[in-house]
Amino acid sequence: MSEHEPVTSPDQHKPGHPRAARFGAAVSVLVLLTMLVGNHRGRVEDIFLIVCAGLLVLALVGDWVLRRNGLR
């Protein structure tokens, strides 16, 4: 089965549409932060939402730094 597959290098397996992924991550951060406004009384949900949004922001900043330095 493997003898019929083409030989490719690892850099040819890049995911498609990175711009759409960055836009989707930014929209997700905004949606997560708007969920802070609500009628819930506990703060555990708020902490979870802020941590998730922060992780997405860190991923976006890391991606931006890598693209700026030409490492991606």
Image: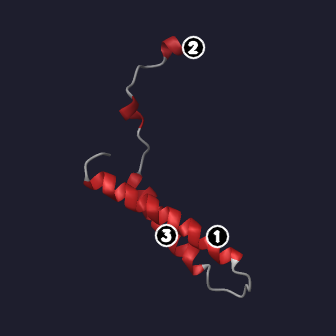
Residue 8 in view in this figure: yes
Residue 20 x %, y % = 43, 58
Sequence-first disc among 2 and 3: 2
Where is the N terminus found, in terms of image quarters? Answer: top right
Q: CA distance from mark 1 to mark 3?
A: 17 Å
The secondary element bearing badge 1 is classed as helix
Q: Which mark is residue 48?
A: 1
Q: Is residue 57 above or below residue 34?
A: above
* Mark 2 crowd level (few <14, some 14–19, many ≥20, 10 Å Cα): few
Q: CA distance from mark 2 to mark 3?
A: 42 Å
Q: Is residue 35 above or below residue 5?
A: below
- Please report the residue visible at 72 percent of the width from the left and 88 percent of the height from the top: 39
Q: Is residue 4 above or below residue 23?
A: above
Sequence-first disc among 1 and 3: 3
Instruction: Report which residue position mark 2 lands on.
Output: 1
Q: Amino acid at mark 3?
A: Val
Instruction: Report which residue position mark 3 lands on.
Output: 27
- Please report the residue visible at 46 percent of the width from the left and 65 percent of the height from the top: 57
Residue 72 x %, y % = 32, 46
Residue 35 x %, y % = 62, 79
